[in-house]
Amino acid sequence: MQVKEKAIELLSSGKVSRVLGWKQGEFCYDLTPAVFESAEEVERSFVFSPLAGANLAKYLIAESRKEGVVAAFLKPCDSYSVLQLCKEHRIRRENVYLVGVPCEGTVDPDLLRENAKGLTAVREAGGTLVCDTLYGEKRVDLSAVLLERCKVCKSKKIVVFDELLGENGEENPQSTRFAAVEEIENLTPEERYAFWQKELSRCIRCNACRNVCPACSCETCVFDNAKLGTDNKAPASRFEEQYFHIIRAFHVAGRCTDCGECSRVCPQKIPLHLLNRKFIRDMNTLYGQYQAGADEESLPPMLDFRMDDCEPSAARGGKQA
Amino acid sequence: MKKIEKARLPELFAALNETAALYLPADRDGVAAFTRWQEGVTLTEKLNTVRSAKDLFFPQVETLANFKTQGGTIEIEDAARQDEDFIVFGVRACDLRSFEILDRVFLAEPQDTFYKARREHAAIITLACNAPEETCFCTAFSIDAADPQGDVTAFLTDTALCLRANTEKGENLLAKLPLSDGAESEIAAWQKQARETLEKLPIQLDLSGFTGERMMELFNHPAWQPLSEACLGCGTCTFVCPTCQCYDVKDFKTKDGVQRFRCWDSCMYSDFTMMSAGQPRPTQKERFRQRFMHKLVYYPMNNEGIFSCVGCGRCLQKCPIHMNIVKVAKTLGGERDA
Amino acid sequence: MQVNGAWQPTIVAFCCNWCSYAGADLTGTNRLAYPANVKIIRIPCSCRLNPLFILRAFGRGADGVILCGCHPGDCHYTTGNYYARRRMTLLFSMLDFLGIERERTRVEWVSAAEGAKFAAVMNDFVRQITVLGENKRLEDFRCK
């Protein structure tokens, strides 16, 4: 347990005053992000496993504004979010100590539970998850229960760290993460409309996608503004759902690192990442390759322009009728 | 006791639907939800729906009244109440208990006539559990998931669906269906096995510490801070919860008038119960505390000790950061420190 | 919008104060005609147009939304319309991605001197939306 030992070492040496990590839950998969203040606490309930899916970047906004240095463990995806937030001056870099942790993919608890009904405990054994369930032991292939974002992992590179546990990985230009977007683009407008109606109509406006998003870090969201009349809490008409999701994705265009948290947390399993990826793909093709959070210097496409940018009339979101 | 072979379930659903509109848990794009039955809709394999059966009685959004303006006059149009019977099939024991909890809120004076109309027009067919999941903890609330009540109780064994009427409404309903006679004994073994599994559920909660006398002690408990620390302030737990009943009443300006509607609200939201003086619960800690204090302390104080949680486990599965009532109850109950 | 029992499209035109809004004025003073279906909303610069406005216009009954701004290079604030161009490109692409008719939204660059162009653009846009018919895919049915 390298990660846990590192957390204990950082706290007992006094290098940091707090550690941001994942806390043991009732089962193997319900880990809660938590701040640990002592080595004893870490010893007792700190966990790191392929089930530690939560991206901790957003918590650093508040944590880095508190007294003392906070340490955080970053998977490659999370490191992109952290660097992006540093770039936006949301995280105070001097107050955080970042430990990079290589990642071989995180597990979708829902998929795992479907494959192992009554799941209580799990241990990893070379690419296989050995699960204890209410109904006996069950073996599940790790690759079969990965989160969507991990199946099409864009990068195993940790882009910002003070210390690295193990070897840093590489970007994966072969990632097929835009394949699903292309698939939808190849539908007719009628089919695309039907697809999104079907998906978005399940939305219950719980706002989990917005609240978990590291890029959604506004102090007051436009959708919490009663005076603007945009604060409808429920999808009272199908317009609301589209309205909310289009604007949500638009507001993070150019800042979204494609960490996949929005889809991970959706209780209704709406593939929200596809909206974000559509924007990323459009920006890549129209304004040049850009990866949010990959560096601290480059100008994001939505804060930039060229004299010879294409006209909006050229914008196409897919095959035409 | 009546029964029908498992293979003939579509026939049963069609017959039920003949008597009144039938809703049952079915898979919709991989997500189980209470669905209006039509030819081809089959019962989900999943244990329970993502959104609870509460939706059918207290929908997420409903219109209360319409105001139409014309010249200098305003016409007020009351919204229609449910006036047709409907049947809900496949309600689990936990969701059934939630109706009792909601009844105490909505049917207390002044009665909520929208809710009341739906309750009166519904026939509930419960479905007994024999394969609970690890997130189930209905046993903590003395719910017998292997033998729920409702108008009719259904038991789905390997070969047949057995039905037992519990009320007169249920008797009348069963009389209209193409069923053969069965015996109580046929499900005895099934029920015994189900109860054995239920006894072994991993979550065992001791809720004896949540009493009215300890209200202030619990309210001021230092553990609320660490417990709520990771809370994102989304409404997932409240919206999938079968017993959460808070709503907001809002006006929507339509083309030629105003539509007054109510929609679910969540105590986890930053603008919940917002007043002109501001937000009475300024940080997530207070909002988080409110939810669990309500379920475990305030509600039981007002309702003869009945907790407003049914142990369905939805929040355990759906919370994005996996903070839930079980962790809260165990922490404040003193079993584990925060 | 129903006029004498027949459907007529409602068009919302967001016009930049420094060019197209004056262009619309010029259309009038030149006694050129453009359809009354067009409702103009003046904005200080094309880049003031929040995508929320466009969706809101559709939600509340618009059948087409058009943004008119200064020609690229002529922005009163030097670069506003360049940003607007990128934003609208992405937004329109997204609407198309969601299956909402691509032809319902448009951006045109109209200067204060182009009264005739303003009339021509509006005439053409209204014709296009009339052919397309009522906005059904991005409407809030409560506003009907």
Image (cartoon, coloured by chain):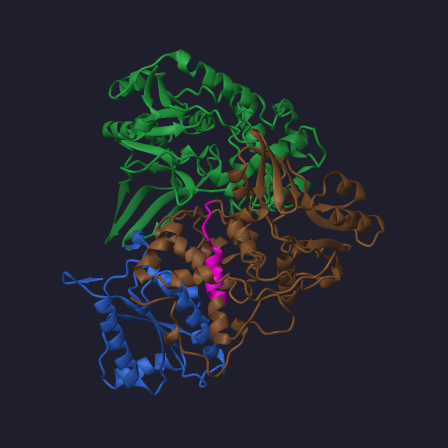
Q: At x 59% / y 23%, what residue is drawn?
A: B200
For residue A37, above or below residue B12? below
The residue lying furthest to the left in this view is: C4
Which residue is more in the foreground, B162 or B288? Answer: B162
For residue B299, above or below residue C100? above
> Where is residue B37 drawn, in percent x and y?
30, 36
- Colour in which chain C is drawn: blue
- Colour in which chain A is drawn: brown
Which residue is more in the foreground, B226 or A274? Answer: A274
- Colour in which chain B is drawn: green
> Where is residue B210 drawn, in percent x and y?
62, 25
Position of C27 with respect to A29 (left or right) is left
> Where is residue B98 drawn, in percent x and y?
46, 28
User: On the image, which quarter does residue B231 sit in?
Assistant: top right
Position of A287 with respect to B169 (left or right) is right
Name the magenta segment's main secondary structure. Answer: helix
> Where is residue A86 drawn, in percent x and y?
66, 64
Q: Which residues are magenta?
A: A268-280
One can see residue A247 in this view? no
Which residue is more in the foreground, B290 or B242? Answer: B242
Quadrant that contains the C terminus of chain B? top right
